Image: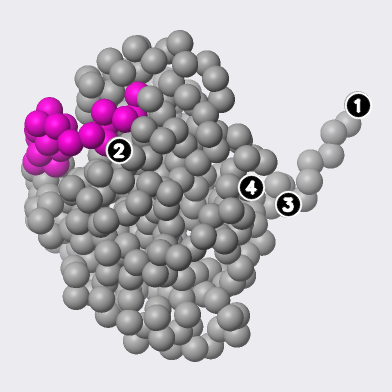
Amino acid sequence: MRFVVDQQVEDIEMPENLKLNTFLQEFHSDCTHPECGFGFYGFAFGQSPFPVPKLIQDALIKNANKGKYAPVPGIPELRNAISKYNKHYFKMDVSPDRIYVGPGTKELIFNLLEILHGTVILPTPAWLGYLPQIRFLKKNYHMLPTRANKKIATNDLRHLALRLQDRQKILILNNPHNPTGLLYSRLELEEIADVCRELNITVISDEIYAQTTYDFSKFVSMGKIFPDGTFVTNGLSKSHAAGGYRLGYVIFPQHATDLKAQFKKILATEYTAVSTPIQHAAIPGFEISPELDNYFETTRNIHKIMGEYTFSKLTSIDGIKATKPESTFYLLADFNAYAPELEKAKITTSQKLSEVLIVHPYHTAIVGGIV
């Protein structure tokens, strides 16, 4: 029996970070040098190194017997907790009925792209997961290259949007930003929001790294700046080091009642609901507690130490530039000063550089900045 794969699937490439991580999970160094028995140094996969907060672990154990299907948008207790969480930390007064729970923000962004008509504007550099989703859904899209500061320039956004004929445009905003570690200020977000209002641009604001902002007082959600036109996604994966729990949420814009009904239909069709025990386990992760505050403060301080140390070490090398992270556990390094030497070694792309670095004598895993 020969099985034929749909061409739409054939045309999709696995994101480079996941492709590399899959390789690394199966990677065992067969290097003959005894000092290489450790395997490799892993800098390639965006996963927080910390343990899941104990109060979430305990809640998962306690609720392991919850075997019934959950409501499609999420259990009420969890949506209420997320509502209070956003009011406490992000100063957003969001009613629970504007919140939908899904199996990770990745899936929720995919679902939003399914139901929203229009051309997608993708600022670059970007997280490697966005583009495969856009292509899989056969959405029209345009890249929006950022300038030297690696942030969206409002004039560039306006000029691009004016060239697009769609009644609606969709801007994917990632703040704090993967892979640069940069943070948009309130003023920068306000300027972007002004353009979006003017030119009917809907925003999907991926804020999964919000709680990792080193100086948390500087984080502002786009949902607060542009509440009538922004979908905010967030979850447990980065801030709570619980990527494997696969739980995220989306906050719908104000007055998007009809759209929520369409979204619910999509969720019910595709996966019914998020695992019920996981939803119950997530509740204390979104409740306000001294234990959680201490966890956030400790982990973001460690991220800051490592981010600043890595930035300092990289930029001390003559010719190398890098973004100085203000959040997350990423930075973007620029090796273009070494392009002539790298070309002599037949290394002409960042992806090729990452492939070379994984083998002896380097054994270092990084992700190329291809988008």
Q: Earlier in the sequence, mark 4 or mark 1?
A: 1
Give the image location of residue 321, x and y in percent.
20, 63
- Magenta stretch: includes residue 253: no
Give the image location of residue 364, x and y in percent.
31, 37
Tell me if label 4 and label 1 are in contact, CB under 8 Å.
no
Q: Earlier in the sequence, mark 2 or mark 3?
A: 3
Name the amino acid type tagged 2: Ala
Name the amino acid type tagged 3: Gln
Marks 2 and 1, how far apart at CA:
51 Å
Please tell me whether mark 3 or mark 1 is closer to you in this view: 3
Q: Where is mark 1, residue-wise?
A: 1
Q: Earlier in the sequence, mark 3 or mark 1?
A: 1
- Which quadrant would the N terminus be assigned to in this image? top right
Q: Where is mark 3, residue-wise?
A: 8
Residue range in magenta is 281-301
* Residue ranking furthest to the right: 1
Q: Where is mark 4, residue-wise?
A: 265
Give the image location of residue 196, x and y in percent.
40, 78
Name the amino acid type tagged 1: Met
Q: Secondary structure at mark 4?
A: helix
Q: Residues within 10 Å of mark 4 (few under 14, many from 20)?
A: few
